[in-house]
Amino acid sequence: MNLLYSNDRKGEFPPSWYAATAHELARFPPLRGEVKADVCVVGAGYTGLSAALHLAEAGLDVVLVEAHRVGFGASGRNGGQLGSGQRVEQDALERLVGPDDARKLWQMGEEAKDLVRGLIARHGIDCDLTPGIMWTGSSKAEVRHLHEYGALLRDRYGYDKVEILDEAACGAICPSPDYKGGCLDMGGAHLHPLNYALGLGRAAAAAGVRIFEETQVHHVEERQPAIVRTDRGRVVADHVILACNGYLGGLNRKVAARVMPINNFIVATEPLGEDANRVLTRDVAVADSRFVINYFRLSRDKRLLFGGGESYGYRFPRDIAAVVRKPMTEIFPHLRDVRIDYAWGGTLAITMKRLPYLARVAPNILSASGYSGHGVGTATHAGQLMALAIRGESEGFDVMSRLPVPPFPGGPGFRTPLLVLAMTWFALRDRLGV
């Protein structure tokens, strides 16, 4: 199954609230015939756009090819949360990679947030960037863990932007009967993800990147120079960057063995008006502690943008709104009958240990993917790191490429059924409160 086309119309954004409120970017032509470049970037999400932009600003000739549109994939559909650190918590990273690399990874997470803010400011990207992400727990054990983690970041990493919230303080911000406390990270932020991607696209084009949309890559010949074959042409390039994430398909087996595509879903309710204060009293985003995570925030026009729900397999469910309404009403029972105006799905990518997979898959081919739901900052940063590595400054890329990212068990034929079993088990634990 080709995930590029199994759930979406060719060259069209999904019917999301993001697409409905996007600052339109004129279409770029498809690639026809042969072109040559210093670097060919495959995929116009955050990773590819960041890599292309940074390379072009350094004076390299860059071609960027995208099977659909700039920002078409997870970069234009996600929850819009710019989180701190890595997807894996710092104490777990310390056990996994040691304290020195864990500290480097924390600092790189901070650099990723600064990079996103800097790009938005430098290129005048209008994407509603707003500080604040709240982490919430639904049980005393979850709240205790969040409080301990907030204290760890303060005491061991000197991060003083996390406020510990008891049940009353949490409820004053998010009056859901489900949440018993948490933390508020004012160093994190949230934004309009598609407008951020489109802004990067404008900046890349202005820097001289040659962008080709509706140009699917079928094969990459690992040679010097490399040849990137598309449906109607090819790119001959000294270097190639694979920035495909969940839409990689069979372009590289080494990456595909470690990076698995999964689907996630978001709805946008009707504007809530004054009732928005019964969801959030402050303009912050929320992510809870469930294994099958719920995440949400209010839009500028006071809609609830709520992500969650479960669906296994590569096709989107027929009724996305019904899938997401269930967890939404568990958190906010009073929204049981609220109208849902937009419902959409997207394909992201995860790894076994929820750490990104950055690799040199051939002497002149780099890849970055598998952000596991932490991609707004990490993907943007990964693009910059690959651009630096191509220019000979590989220290940051090397740190990320040392992360332990094992292949999924079962190979291509069995890894999805095994994931379904695991996710079903953890989802059951969420429902039981274990």
Image (cartoon, grey):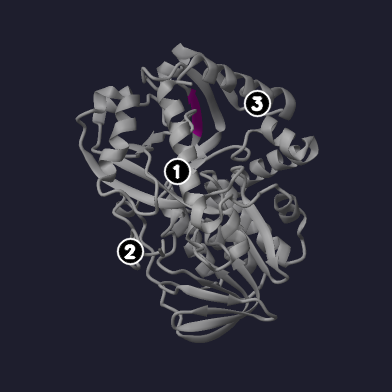
> Would you call the spot at circle 3 few (<14 residues within 10 Å), some (14-19), or many (20 or more)?
some
The amino acid beneath tag 3 is Asp
**Residue 351 visible (yes or no):** yes
Q: CA distance from mark 2 to mark 1?
A: 29 Å
Which residue: 62% across, 37% down? Answer: 88
- Tell me which corner region of the image, top left, top right, bottom left or bottom right, holds residue 145: top right
Q: Which residue is mark 1?
A: 420
Identify which residue, 43 or 23, lies in the foreground.
43
Report the disc number at residue 90: none
> Magenta span has 140?
no
Of the two numbered discs 2 and 3 on the same chain, state the one appearing first in sequence: 2
The amino acid beneath tag 1 is Val
Q: Position of residue 101 (x, y in %)?
A: 77, 41
Which residue: 51% across, 38% down? Answer: 189
* Pair 3/1: label in front: 1
Q: Position of residue 198 (x, y in %)?
A: 44, 59
**Residue 284 visible (yes or no):** no
Of the two numbered discs 3 and 1 on the same chain, state the one appearing first in sequence: 3
Which residue: 26% across, 49% down? Answer: 318
Q: Which residue is mark 2?
A: 12
Q: Secondary structure at mark 2?
A: loop
Which residue: 42% across, 19% down? Answer: 179
Q: Which residue is mark 3?
A: 160
Question: Residues in magenta?
Answer: 132-136
Q: Position of residue 85 (x, y in %)?
A: 63, 38
Do labels 2 and 1 touch, CB within 8 Å? no
> Would you call the spot at circle 1 few (<14 residues within 10 Å), some (14-19), or many (20 or more)?
some
Q: CA distance from mark 3 to mark 1?
A: 38 Å
Is 366 situated left or right of 168 in this image? right
* Pair 2/3: label in front: 2
Identify which residue, 222 or 281, lies in the foreground.
222
